Amino acid sequence: MNMINVINLCRLDAGTFGTMGVGLGFAIAAAILVKYKDEKLDPPASRVVCIQGDSAFGFSGMELETVFRHKLPIVFIILNNNGIYNGVDEESWKDLTSSSEGAATSAPPTALLPSARYEKIIEAFGGSGYFVKTPQELNFALKNAFEKTNEASLINVMIDPFSQRKQQEFAWLTRSNL
């Protein structure tokens, strides 16, 4: 099997412990590999997609500068629920932060600023950013992001901040082997 086929079948994951923030670094490494394996192909035969939450993106989001410095056409998809595990909606945020103490003492420690516009960060570097709230907007953003074969794109997908994690069917997805 040649390297392109192997790359197309690969998935990098933080594993059982769900280490937040490593996805962007994983994507950069994978995109550099694809770039040099496909250097004679325009567009490259493979695309790298980085899917992570808003909190994980917060840990390493400024590595987008590295993406642009090395001209890596990664598609970033941020699943934005306004928080770590779960956040609050905009109305709840306003209620929580309307007191004189503000967010520091009234908002849950897992809440992030609602509807943060992470796609604006990639736009600052010259990439394409999409703010998505509906399935139709997601279809449009995905189509456009994948058409830009020589440019990085970021799709900021707003999801329900109150949704719960899907129950895991297999224990190996949620337990450590240590």
Image (tube, helix red, strand yellow):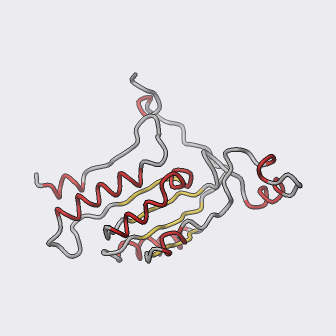
Residue pushed farthest top? 178
Q: Residue at x 39, y 65 (%)?
A: 75
Left or right of residue 98, residue 124 in this image: left
Q: What is the number of callouts on the image?
A: 0
Q: Residue at x 17, y 58 (%)?
A: 4
Q: Is residue 135 above or below residue 112?
A: below
Q: Position of residue 44 (x, y in %)?
A: 22, 70
Q: Position of residue 46 (x, y in %)?
A: 25, 64
Hey, which quadrant is residue 15 in on the image?
top left
**61 and 38: which one is in front?**
61
Q: Is residue 2 above or below residue 137?
A: above
Q: Position of residue 177 (x, y in %)?
A: 39, 24
Q: Position of residue 73 (x, y in %)?
A: 33, 69
Q: Residue at x 35, y 74 (%)?
A: 151
Q: Is residue 160 above or below residue 146?
A: above
Left or right of residue 21, residue 100 in this image: right
Residue pushed farthest right? 100
Q: Residue at x 24, y 56 (%)?
A: 8
